[in-house]
Image (cartoon, rainbow, N blue to C red):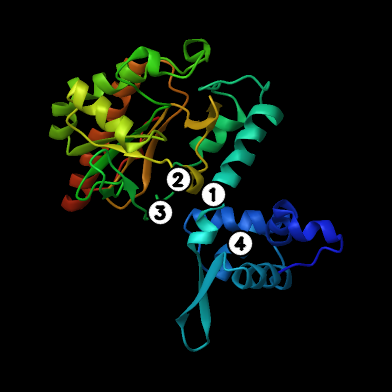
Amino acid sequence: MVRRGDPEDVNCSIAQALDVVGDSWTLLIIRDAARGLTRFEQFQQELGLSRKVLAERLRLLVDAQVLTRQPYQERPLRHEYRLTPRGRALLPVLVALQDWGDSWLLGTGEPTATTVEASREAERVHALLGTRIPELLLPGADGEPHDPVAAGGATVLYCFPGAFVRPESYPPGWSAVPGAPGCTLESLTYRDRLAEFTAAGAAVHGVSTQRPDEQRAFAEAESLGFPLLSDLGLGLTGALRLPTLRAAGTTRLKRLTLVVDRDRTVREVLYPVTDITASVAAALRAARGVQADRAATRSGHAVRPSAR
């Protein structure tokens, strides 16, 4: 798919990539496909595009093998659009664009692992309340793929920049990055209160963009007792538009916590996390609330709203 006229563009991978994803609507379609949208009407409602423009962009992405097009209804014939491996390989590009926007358009350009409560970044993260976590698998510290949402009950999904066995393993200047220190304390606090989460019918999962072997070394050294999952490929980060920062050439998650019910719906969002001990306590309260709502639903009572 070469359409650029400059002969030098034939050998320029940037130019060739822009032939596929150089249009803003195209990137936003990929963004929404990562979130779990699959149908024409869903894309149109989310983006506000005309049917003609949307059909053109979807056709381009299918031709470029970024999306697959599969029928889900015969009469009338309708299709679903899903990301291919080639399409999912674009998620780090979207995350990098978001990180640049958060840092340089919405922020000061200085690295930070947190934000202020009134920021547009925090508003975007809190908009996850009531949305559904798409079905995906993340490699665990055991090397096996895991669903970030536990089956059968609530899941406390706490995201953190990274934790290491030895302090010298942290990126240079890590202690000076606002919001970055405290990863070990957060994991150990969840470990020490794990029995309370279990009693509340909730699983605890930690997520970072560290390699699984790094996570395994930390989990074994600290005897965590719950899974650490690696979003090194940025599948979850891209799907939920989670905030990130760049440190030592690596994309790292900012510290935030989601409490998710058994139907994969986000029931509580904690961001920014400025007091680790308080955030773990708040996550436990939210998990208990999810369990209480489930019990109320089984008994026929109304479900109460989640407390912020």
Circle 4 sits on which residue? Answer: 45
Farthest-out residue, bottom: 75
Give the percent coordinates (x, y) of residue 87.
54, 59
Viewer-proximal residue among 2 and 127: 2
Q: Is residue 179 above or below residue 32?
A: above
Point out the tag, 3 or 2, that comes first from the N-terminus. Answer: 3
What is the C-alpha distance between the residues marked 3 and 2?
Answer: 15 Å
Circle 3 sits on which residue? Answer: 134
Q: The disc labelled 1 sits on which kind of residue? A: Leu
What is the C-alpha distance between the residues marked 4 and 1?
Answer: 22 Å
Q: The disc labelled 3 sits on which kind of residue? A: Pro
Mark 2 and 1 residues: CB-CB less than 8 Å, in contact? yes
Circle 2 sits on which residue? Answer: 233
How many dots with numbers? 4
Q: The disc labelled 4 sits on which kind of residue? A: Gln
What is the C-alpha distance between the residues marked 3 and 1?
Answer: 14 Å
Point out the tag, 4 or 1, that comes first from the N-terminus. Answer: 4
Q: Is residue 176 above or below residue 250?
A: above
**In screen coordinates, is 9 left or right of 253?**
right
Asked which secondary structure carries label 3, the reply is loop
Circle 1 sits on which residue? Answer: 91
Label 2: how many Cα within 10 Å (few below 14, some 14–19, many 20+): some
Asked which secondary structure carries label 2, the reply is loop
Asked which secondary structure carries label 4, the reply is helix
Quadrant for the N terminus, please: bottom right
Point out the tag, 3 or 1, that comes first from the N-terminus. Answer: 1
What is the C-alpha distance between the residues marked 4 and 3?
Answer: 18 Å
Query: Depth-wise, is mark 3 or mark 2 nearer the camera?
Result: 2
Viewer-proximal residue among 26 and 19: 19
Asked which secondary structure carries label 1, the reply is helix
